[in-house]
Amino acid sequence: MQKLFNKILVPVDFTSRSKKAIENAGELAIEYNCSIHLLHVIVISPLEAMAFAENTLAMPQLLDNKSELEFKLEKLCAAISSKSKDSVNVQYSIISGTWDESIIEFANKNQFDLILIGQKETIMGKRKMILNPDRIAAKTNAPVITVPANRRVTRLYSVIIPITDFLPVRKLMYGVYMASNYNATIKLLGVENAGTKQKVMYYMMKAYKLISENCSLKVEFEKTQATNVADAVNRYAQDKAADLVIVNPGTQTKMPGVLASLLGNIIQKYSSPPVLTVNPA
C-alpha cells in the first residue's frame, strides 16, 4: 500500500491542547515513520500582516518574543526526539499572520500530508479550538486530525466512514490505510433521507466491495435515516465507541441548528473519538 503519511504538521500555541497534539504526533511519527514540523503563529491582523510583508510597519514585539518562542519550541523538539530515541526528524518554524490562513499557506507550500490539531478539555459537551479543521482540510490537500485531550490515534479498533450520495474514495483510502496498521474494523454508515435512499445504498455496497476485494480488513455496514449527517455520525460513533471518524468538510461536519454555521458548530468540537477531515477532491 502507498505510504500516505510522511510529513506531519502540528500547530503549537503552548497550551494543553498543543501538548496532546504533540504527544499524538510523536506516536504517529514512530508508527508511520514520519517527520514532524511544529508551527507557531504570532497572531497579527491582516492589515498588519500586509504592512509587515511590505516593510512599511516595524514589529519590534515579534523580535522581542522570538528568542523565547524558539527556546520553547526547541525544548518540545528535544522531547520528541528523546521519546523516539532520535528516530523522528523534528523541526519547527515561527511565522506571523492569522492561524488558519498561515497554516493553510504553510502546509500547501511545504507539501505536508497530515495536520494534527489538539483540543481543550470538554466544556458542556463542546470543545474549544482556535483553529477551523474544516477550513484547513478544504483549503489543503492534507487530511486534518483533531484529537480530544483524552484520546489517542494510535490505538484503533473501529473506524467509522459515513456514506452519502457519492463514493468517498479518499475517505476509504485513508480509512483502509490507518485501519490496516491496527487490524481495525471499518464501519460504513449509510446516512440517507427520502431523496438519497437509493444512491446511499448503491455507494455503500460499492464501498464495501471495494474494501473487501482489496484488503483483508473486517468491514461492517449499517444505514440510518437522518437530515443532518454530522449529527447522525456523532451519535453513531458514541453508540459504537468508535476510535476514529473520517468525514469530508462541509455538509458532513456541520452540526444541526439554525446558527450552527455562524457559531462554528462542527462535529470536530463534539465527537468523542478523533476526527479525520479529508478533502474529497
Image (cartoon, rainbow, N blue to C red):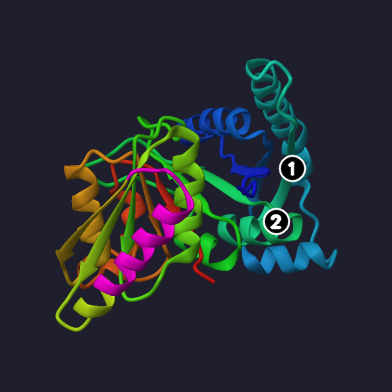
Q: Toward which corner of the image does residue 262 lie, by quadrant?
A: bottom left
Numbered circle sitting on residue 93: 1
Q: Main secondary structure of the magenta part?
A: helix
Q: Nearer the viewer, residue 93 or 205?
A: 205
* 111 to the left or right of 99: right
Q: Is residue 208 magenta?
A: yes
Q: Toward which corner of the image does residue 159 lie, by quadrant?
A: top left
Q: Which residues are magenta?
A: 201-218
Residue at the spot 78% in from the left edge and 47% down from the top edge: 60
Q: Is residue 118 magenta?
A: no
Q: Amino acid at mark 1?
A: Ser
Residue at the spot 70% in from the left edge and 33% down from the top edge: 69
The relative height of residue 18 versus residue 142 in the rendered view (above or below) is: above
Residue at the spot 79% in from the left edge and 42% down from the top edge: 63
Q: Quadrant of the C terminus?
A: bottom right
Lower sequence index among marks 2 and 1:
1
Q: Position of residue 227 (x, y in %)?
A: 18, 72
Q: Are marks 2 and 1 in contact (CB under 8 Å)?
A: yes
The relative height of residue 183 versus residue 109 in the rendered view (above or below) is: above
How many numbered discs, if any?
2
Q: Toward which corner of the image does residue 226 lie, by quadrant?
A: bottom left
Q: Position of residue 122 (x, y in %)?
A: 29, 38
Residue 128 showing in the rendered view: yes
Outermost residue on the bottom side: it is 195
Residue 133 showing in the rendered view: no
Q: Nearer the viewer, residue 125 or 139?
A: 139
Q: Amino acid at mark 2?
A: Phe
Please name the residue that numbered disc 2 is placed on: 106
